[in-house]
Amino acid sequence: MVSFNNRLKKHITELSSYLCVGLDISPESLGSASSLSQCVDHANRVIDATIDLAAAFKPNLAFFEQWGSAGYKWLEETMEYINNGTLTIADGKRGDIGNTAEKYAQSIFDHFGFDAATVNPYMGEDAIVPFIKRPDKGAFILCKTSNPSSGDFQNSQNGQKHMFELVARKSVELNSTENVGLVVGATIPEEIKTIRRIAPELPFLIPGVGAQGGDLEKSTQYGNENGLALISISRGIIFSGDKTEKAIRSTAKDYKDKMMDLVHG
């Protein structure tokens, strides 16, 4: 069985793309009166525009769950719509333990068919292990996130180490089947370098470029220096320009090409 991390590396190489397109389809961004059907149409428009450009799609589960049972049906339909071999990451930041975590993993991997999930490590190893039991399914563990208050806990120190450094070290320990990665935000690029030194073998999922103001150049270079990183862009692509398929594709292609130039020159 090929591990998730090796699948990811192979997919990035074959597609020549480090781009991950986040599917955060909010009705507010389409217009205050937008309906579920308009959100569905726009999500499909984004997928059509970027399917051959994106190494991965990252549906944000909250934007589907807000619609209740209809939203879960939409998520099922979206996964079927993507179904062309492109990797999919469930952005749900699950973080429970025991049977609850097992059921979260079962839902994400078995029911919806995702290849990987984002996982919150606050409750420790018990919250992570259910998502990495199968080598072909991956977990991107929240390490140093891109939100303004991330330092409230993640920068706390235990001895000489910050909490985010301890998360990175623990994640390396858990990567015995090569299916663990880290979420590292683009808004503080120097910390990408710090974490890359700790975890050279782990793939990074780097959000925060675009609407959050993260540094594309440094994030792409630091994340892919002695390692591998997906750069996740959501609003900066999916609501770009006049929100037409042409505008979305043009923006996505620009990002993809810039990333390739930054990594390979």
Image (spheres, rainbow, N blue to C red):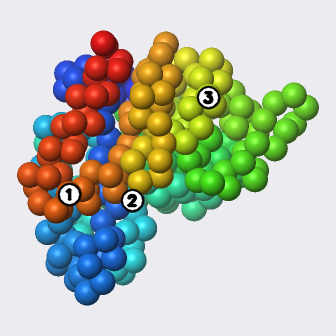
Above or below, comparing residue 215 to residue 6 in the picture: below
Above or below, comparing residue 13 to residue 21 in the picture: above
Above or below, comparing residue 106 to residue 195 in the picture: below
The answer to whether one can see residue 106 in this image is no
Q: Secondary structure at mark 3?
A: helix
User: Which residue is at a point 75% across and 53% down the rendered structure image?
Assistant: 152
- Whole-percent x, y for residue 54 in the image: 23, 39
Q: Which residue is mark 2?
A: 60
Q: Residues within 10 Å of mark 3 (few under 14, many from 20)?
A: few
Residue in the foreground of this view, choosing between 240 and 58: 240
Amino acid on which disc 3 is placed: Glu
**In which quadrant is the C terminus drawn?**
top left
Quarter of the image holding residue 169?
Answer: top right
Q: Mark 1 or mark 2, which has the lower sequence index?
A: 2
Q: Which residue is mark 3?
A: 190
Q: Mark 1 or mark 3, which has the lower sequence index?
A: 3
Q: Which residue is mark 1?
A: 241
**What's the CA distance linking mark 1 and mark 2?**
22 Å
Q: Which label is found at residue 166? A: none
- Whole-percent x, y for residue 94 in the image: 54, 56
Relative side of 256 to 192, left or right: left
Q: Mark 2 or mark 3, which has the lower sequence index?
A: 2
- 1 or 2: mark nearer the eye: 1
Amino acid on which disc 1 is placed: Gly
The answer to whether one can see residue 249 in this image is yes
Q: How many marks?
A: 3
User: Which residue is at a point 30% across and 83% down the rendered structure image?
Assistant: 32
- Whole-percent x, y for residue 61 in the image: 40, 63
- Whole-percent x, y for residue 158 in the image: 87, 36
Amino acid on which disc 2 is placed: Asn
